Image (cartoon, rainbow, N blue to C red):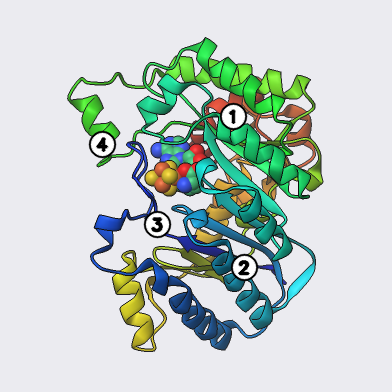
């Protein structure tokens, strides 16, 4: 039986960062939707979801965005308590919120901690003012260390998100950001290669020649340097973009996604995956609210996954993990996989010893070429 998890998408941001295409809205983009109404709409969706799935203990809850911490702490705590009263909470459940560094202070963090949150993930991105400016991040870099320190003092597990490969970012600037992040001694670090998403301001600036395209070779060098630096500091990778010091420090919520467990995504644009069905909510908060007021689940694109789709999803997600992918899953999708598997062992893209034990586990080289490995093992 799959475990059950909740994701709450809070679709509000003060300003939109130039590189971001997440489902989030600034005040002017809300078309009159009042942010103050969000909690009541969430309550309605939680009540409807309970009718659909029945009471199932939550193993993790994750508030993401957008910027969840633009809501008052009391509203995040209230949303959490509605979820817990409705579904119940497993012992030792992980309760996380993402936070933009300049949206919290000691009082805010204390209220979250007392309200049941036990993990917080800060969007640091970089420690270098020029890089933050290129990314159009508005926070003061010093606020990250201050808030990580305050959060740790209050007993939160902490994580910081970094981005590498911003246009013009040098290797030295990247190294500095990593050193600053390490000096904060977080429990967990996520590092994402900057993706130039079509339709973003960054994509327009790059096609107009105002900013250079991220250099792929330099991005790979940054990843390799990061891996060796984090290993030296006792951090181990457990997913392509995620490192922690101990297994208990892994993001239990994200592990649940990657292992294909069940989760309900609440809020505009959130995705859900329950009992082999997958769907996403409508994107704009006004449309989301209207459907809920009409008594409907605010979702579109409900899809019953075929067995093949479920296996493909397991392959795609499992390959990203250090625990790797069961070779039996690959064999079901591609009965001719023995040859590409042994070729990729020879090319040092996948680990030979793990392959003998029936698992496909990426080497460091393979992690840089994960999409290619996936295509090859599936014979695509
Ligand atoms: C969507 S944000 C939400 C949390 C919060 N608003 C923040 O910015 O930290 C979550 C993470 O996604 C990552 N992200 C967003 N857009 C990205 C992109 N185009 N390329 C790489 N990482 C991206 C950032 O590292 C960010 O920390
Ligand atoms: S990166 Fe975070 S703060 Fe920036 S627009 Fe996206 S969700 Fe908002």
Taking the spot 34% from the left edge, 69% from the top edge, the residue there is: 34
The answer to whether marks 2 and 1 mark residues whose Cβ atoms lie closer than 8 Å is no
SS label for mark 3:
loop
- Of labels 1 and 3, the one closer to you: 3
Question: Tag 1 or tag 2, which sits nearer the N-term?
Answer: 2
Crowding near the residue tagged with mark 4, few <14, some 14–19, many ≥20 C-alpha atoms within 10 Å? some
The answer to whether marks 4 and 3 mark residues whose Cβ atoms lie closer than 8 Å is no
User: Could you give the CA–CA distance between mark 4 and mark 2, rounded to whole angstroms?
Assistant: 34 Å
Q: Which mark is residue 367?
A: 1
Question: Tag 1 or tag 4, which sits nearer the N-term?
Answer: 4
Q: Residue 248 carries which label?
A: none
Question: Tag 2 or tag 4, which sits nearer the N-term?
Answer: 2
Between 9 and 320, the residue placed more toward the observer is 9
Question: Tag 3 or tag 1, which sits nearer the N-term?
Answer: 3
Task: Look at mark 3 in the image and give the residue it sits on.
Answer: 12
User: Could you give the CA–CA distance between mark 1 and mark 3, rounded to whole angstroms?
Assistant: 33 Å
Outermost residue, left side: 208
Q: In this view, does 358 lie to the left or right of 37?
A: right
- Of labels 4 and 2, the one closer to you: 2
Task: Look at mark 2 in the image and give the residue it sits on.
Answer: 77
């Amino acid at each position: 039986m799959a475990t059950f998890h909740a994701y709450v998408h809070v679709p509000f941001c003060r300003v939109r960062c130039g590189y971001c295409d997440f489902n989030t809205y600034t005040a002017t983009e809300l078309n009159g939707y009042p942010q103050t109404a969000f909690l009541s709409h969430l309550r309605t969706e939680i009540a409807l979801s309970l009718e659909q799935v029945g009471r199932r203990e939550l193993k993790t809850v994750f508030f993401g965005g957008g910027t969840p911490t633009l809501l008052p702490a009391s509203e995040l705590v209230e949303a959490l308590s509605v979820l817990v009263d409705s579904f119940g909470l497993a012992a030792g459940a992980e309760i996380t919120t993402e936070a933009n560094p300049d949206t919290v202070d000691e009082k805010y963090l204390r209220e979250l901690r007392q309200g049941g949150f036990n993990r917080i993930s800060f969007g640091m991105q970089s420690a270098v003012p020029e890089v933050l400016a290129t990314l159009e991040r508005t926070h003061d870099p010093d606020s990250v260390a201050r808030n990580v320190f305050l959060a740790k003092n209050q007993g939160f597990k902490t994580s910081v998100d970094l981005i590498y490969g911003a246009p013009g970012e040098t290797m030295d600037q990247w190294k500095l950001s990593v050193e600053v992040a390490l000096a904060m001694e977080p429990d967990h670090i996520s590092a994402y290669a900057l993706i130039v998403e079509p339709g973003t301001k960054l994509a327009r600036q790059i096609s107009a020649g105002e900013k250079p395209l991220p250099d792929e070779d330099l991005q790979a060098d940054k990843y390799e340097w990061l891996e060796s630096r984090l290993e030296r500091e006792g951090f181990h990778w457990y997913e392509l973009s995620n490192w922690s010091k101990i297994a208990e420090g892994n993001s239990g919520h994200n592990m649940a996604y990657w292992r294909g467990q069940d989760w309900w995504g609440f809020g505009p644009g959130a995705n859900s995956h329950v009992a082999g069905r997958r769907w996403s909510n409508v994107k704009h908060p006004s449309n989301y609210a209207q459907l809920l007021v009409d008594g409907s689940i605010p979702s579109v694109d409900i899809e019953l996954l075929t067995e093949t789709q479920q296996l493909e999803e397991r392959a795609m997600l499992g390959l990203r993990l250090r625990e790797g992918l069961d070779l039996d899953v690959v064999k079901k999708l591609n009965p001719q996989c023995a040859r590409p598997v042994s070729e990729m062992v020879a090319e040092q893209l996948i680990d030979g010893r793990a392959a003998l034990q029936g698992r496909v586990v990426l080497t460091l080289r393979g992690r840089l070429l994960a999409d290619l490995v996936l295509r090859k093992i599936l014979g695509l």
